[in-house]
Amino acid sequence: MPALAVATIVLGTMLTTFGISFDIQWHDDVGPDTFFTLSHLMLYAGSALEGLASLAMVLLTTARQRRGDAAPAFAGGPPVRVLGARFTAPLGYLVAGVGAALFLMFGALDLAWHSVYGFDAVLNSPPHIALFLSITLTMVGSIIVCAAASTRWWGRVGIVLGAIVLMAFAPLTARAFDGLPLPFDTRVAGTCFATVTTLIVLGAVLKRSGSMLALAAAFGMLQAILWPWSTWAAHAYADSSGLPLRDGLTGEPPSLPSSLPLFVVVAALCLELAFAVARQRRLGQTTAFMLGGSAAGIVVSVTLLLQTVLFDPTESILTDQYISAGITGLVLGAVSGFLGARLAVLLTMPQAATAGRRVSSSRTVLSTGVTS
Amino acid sequence: VTASARRPWRRRLAAAVSLGLLTGSGAVVASPANAYELVGVVHTENVAAGPYDLTVGFSVWPVRAMQSLDITFSPEGGIADKTGTLAVVGVGADPDLTGPLARHPRKLEVWGLDVIAISAPGTYSLDFVIDGEEGRGAGSLPELTVLAQPGPPLALSWAVCALPFVALVALIGVAWGRVRPSRYRLDL
């Protein structure tokens, strides 16, 4: 049952990611919008799957707990008593379920928004950003679920799939800052932070040398699939609906896939080197992660600007923008390094609890289990 | 009637309802062209672009900041033998709105902007250049007034919609406070 729930929740996050890419491309290339479009259906179905899987696991865990039968920690993470201790929810499913419930709530708010402001003219309206944040929360929940089961093969597969959709989706939330007069590019900042933090957390959870490179390769595969998918789905759906494509389309690359960083493998290589240094204890873990994070951040931020010129030669990026992106990557990469190591500790604590080893001193070493 | 006798009937009903929902939703999803709202023009303005008379139609009037609307551009004699460009000029004008005039996706016989919004109130101008059999003509709708946004203050909307972010930060904060992860070193 835990494996089925993981598969369902990861499938939900995948549906959401493919749905949002399809939907953005539909708006770019075709246009007309209603509530009942196939891309919207994919988005809602993804959240529904995640919500139902989470609800089922909370009810199952509660039933087991009432029978006096403790659920294993790999089934979604440590149990949390909620709603006056009436229910026992595995932490990961609690977070994913709350995200799915917030998605429903803000979906209703989005409808109310439409009644005042009309159909969606922009991607970054407040309710849209709330929907993106809710989905991100669900994806974080799916990572907690999979991390709790990372000793099992399906947990490891789930965590990689969950991480790549999080890396693809989470930067959309940075669109909230579009148009604000900030001294840096918020899209670059969002992409850099989501990419580097996720790589470090996953590298620390999976532990194996090369795991971040594997994650980067999987992210590249997702991008390679989303690329033709988004355009094909929008155009095929327009064709089947009898709607023409917009006039003046010039063969621009699909919006979401082309906004994903292309050079994540290089960033992952920087982080693999930092992890190798930390493993050999040449530097403290935090220092190594922050240095590696900065290098990876610079790679992601600067190449993100470079690839816009690569896809659209008429686009011009000024030297100042590259410098700003480099500084953004340097700073946010260091922050990701600091946070990533600690978030990985939080994610691996359930495993420590399962292993039955105690965490006591300030010099404890955390591993799959914990040794002092 | 016993409970066991009711079950097949209930199953048949459940199956029928499920099938109905599936086919109903499938029909709606499969034929979206029928579901899209037509462009309803509630206000028009006339612009002379050289030798061409152009009717500019608005689906919402007056225009308010952030409120979406369709704008149609209909030259006398149709668009078949003409091309043109549009420039939207003003403090909150999206640069993407400036460019070649394209058919409106839901009203293909005229040019148009499909579900757009002007982000800030103020005075804007719509400037046209049209090429056709009678040569090139330029014209402008010089004073398009965009009123303040409808609805609650934007800060309130953002505060409500930041709730999932607050939930995420609270989750990490609580976990951080309980575990205090800085005390631990990862076994890599």
Image (cartoon, coloured by chain):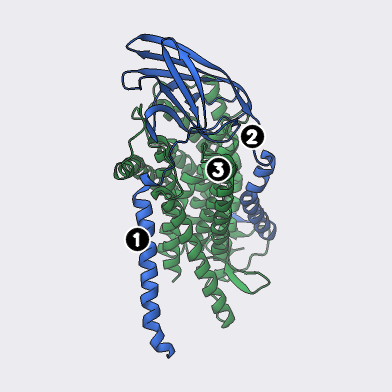
Chain colours: A green, B blue
Q: Secondary structure at mark 2?
A: loop
Nearer to the camera, A195 or B34: B34
Q: Amino acid at mark 2?
A: Gln
Amino acid of disc 3: Thr
Work out whether B78 lies above or below A142. above
Q: Which residue is mark 2?
A: B149
Q: Chain of mark 3?
A: A
- The quadrant in which the C terminus of chain A is found is bottom right
Q: Gap in Å between the C-alphas at discs 1 and 2?
A: 40 Å
Q: Are marks 1 and 3 on the same chain?
A: no
Badge 1: few (under 14), some or many (20 or more) residues near its Cα, within 10 Å? few
The residue closer to the viewer here, B187 or A308, is A308
- Mark 1 touching mark 2, by CB under 8 A? no
Q: Spatial distance from mark 1 to mark 3, Cα to Cα?
A: 35 Å
Give the camera-side residue of A195 and B90. Answer: B90
The residue at which mark 3 appears reads as: A173
Tell me the tag on residue A98. none
Residue drawn at x 44%, y 71% is: A1
The answer to whether any part of residue A129 appears in the image is: no
